[in-house]
Image: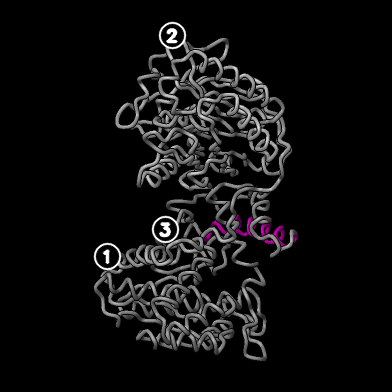
Amino acid sequence: MPAPTQPKCQREKHGFARVAAVSSELKLGDVAANTAILRQEIQRLAAEGVRLMVFPELCLTGYSCADLFHHPVLQQQALVALDELAKVSAGLGCFVVLGLPLLVESRLYNVAAVVGGGRVLGYVPKSFLPNSGEFYERRWFSPAATLRATEVDGVPIGTDLLFEAAELPGFVLGVEICEDLWTVVPPSSLAALAGATILANPSASNEVLGKVQYRRSLVTQQSARCLAAYVYAGAGAGESSTDVVYSGHGLVAENGVLLGETERFSFQTRSAVVDVDLQRLAHERLKSAAFRDDETRPDFRKVRVTLGETTGPIDLLRAISAHPFVPPAGADRRAVCEEIFAIQATALARRLRQTKSKTAVLGLSGGLDSTLALLVMIEALKRADMPISAALTVTMPGFGTTDRTKGNAEELAKALGITLRTISIKAAVEQHFSDIGHPAGLHDITYENAQARERTQVLMDVANQTGGIVIGTGDLSEAALGWCTFNGDHMSMYHVNAGVPKTLVKYLIDWCATELYADEAGTILHDIIATPISPELLPIGADGQIEQKTEDTVGPYELHDFFLFHFVRHGCSAAKIRYLATIAFAGQYESAVLDKWLALFLRRFAQNQFKRSSMPDGPKVGSVALSPRGDWRMPSDWAGPLG
């Protein structure tokens, strides 16, 4: 088989394919009128760069024709219309899924026809015919299991068909019809195991109270279960309302996420047009044991077609969040934050109980990470049935500590009723410099790391002294960049923030300040959020302000969290990450800035695996984690390029 050609469209180069779920206007039984409507919509969507358009079940005639399906004139009109629309598809660069009644060997089947490149490519018959309540399809149609033919007039027919686009790597289409999705083992599950990455469902699901939520759940769950994109097109209000009403519900979901849906109860044509990420789906399947290990992969026939290049616009019809770790604006913030705190606090409480600790020792700097760790620690003590007096925080001012951060640490501990010890590290570090012969005025890496290691030594010894464990404060973003001192803040007895990236740290603290501590403590928390991120290892400025700002050195954490998410979670190449970042941060960062920090991220990520390989235990919180014992394993001496 020849290798697929490289798409010219920038969007498609990065694995995106544009699909549409269409609820078309319908003239019940008027095949000629329906053909004109469908032709117009096919041409319009093709001009928008749509590679797959899915129309409703039996859309050429209408689903609710009832006994008229037996009339040979209606059957013949549908075939003529199908041939006409197949010819319309020539040169449009797309697959079109259309529904019609098809007579095969004296039996009538409810089929979805797939057309493209100017011809009919295949017929997929409906497997499961609803025949109770308001449905009685077996009065007119035979189920797919009764089919013996494998082709009709040279066109393949069967439930074992997949349709592949030669110039779109990873674009493999499988089709099922309406009720097929609602069964115990949907045919689309088998199609997915056979390689289908996009699943189409032309449907005619009527509306009753509560059904819309159930349908939406079915579509999203099937896309998640199959690690696929699912395009569902429901029949609209033009169907007969003799006993039921059809709403024209169209949905597109990808791996459990609803990307788009149509307005319901419209008599006009409505479509949901989105871009699905085929590369992402391929990456998910590579990691999935269900796809790797399945021994019953069904044998499907593949129809491979050269569609040609799309002439549509180059924009991406898909939301790209600049902060993928942070819940979207419409999310239930309280529920999300409570869940994260429950994960972190339960994990820490389990460790405190297991070690029979009398105290939980934490270095409180007045910065973001130690603040989140403190808030989690308070909740963990409750869950471990330990008194608040067991929380022992230590602030350790050094050469770069400012009055602002030290003051915030002191005031926060006081507001929360937490014991705080102040242990200056200056004298100990100066003695250490003298011992190793390091000039005190030389502000190099030794100067910085000596302070971080001294703080860790203090915490470890205080924990030994009080029968406790040291709670680590470093977060997921720092682990990714290696922005921690090896055997300094890199080390603890339990790393409670190990699964929380920097952007999410801010989000969680802001929620605490707004909802849990809307008092004096909340005011302090807001100021901590507003304080520049810094390890405070270099001397402060003449004005007493922070001179060493982390993001001046390694770049904005919002960018690094974006890079981390797409590199680890979705396996994106550097080129694709940059493409997505250009969209997500449009108008915020110039291209040269994105290139600079992306290169730094990839370099630091590779260079600092040795720190992650020896990182302490800590709870996984989201879908991205870097524990060497679980989610991320790579050689510490990796020398090749990343991305």
Q: From the viewer's perspective, tell me whether residue 252 is left or right of residue 556.
A: left
Query: Disc 3 vs disc 2: Cβ atoms closer than 8 Å?
Result: no
Q: Quadrant location of residue 418? A: bottom left
Residue 461 placed where, x, y %? 39, 78
- What amino acid is at disc 1? Gln
Q: Residue at x 49, y 28 (%)?
A: 62
Q: From the viewer's perspective, tell me whether residue 130 is left or right of residue 598.
A: left
- Residue most extreme to the left: 385
> Magenta region: which residues?
592-611
Residue 378 placed where, x, y %? 34, 76
Secondary structure type for disc 3: loop
Q: Quadrant location of residue 332? A: bottom left
Residue 173 placed where, x, y %? 54, 30
| Camera-nearest label, 1 or 2 | 2
Secondary structure type for disc 1: helix
Checking the image for residue 106, the label placed there is 2
**Looking at the image, is 2 positioned above or below residue 537?**
above
Residue 185 placed where, x, y %? 36, 31
Q: CA distance from mark 3 to mark 2?
A: 59 Å
From the image, tell me which residue sits under label 3: 620
From the image, tell me which residue sits under label 1: 354
Secondary structure type for disc 2: loop
Q: Residue at x 56, y 14 (%)?
A: 155
| Camera-nearest label, 3 or 1 | 3
Q: Nearer the viewer, residue 207 or 475?
A: 207
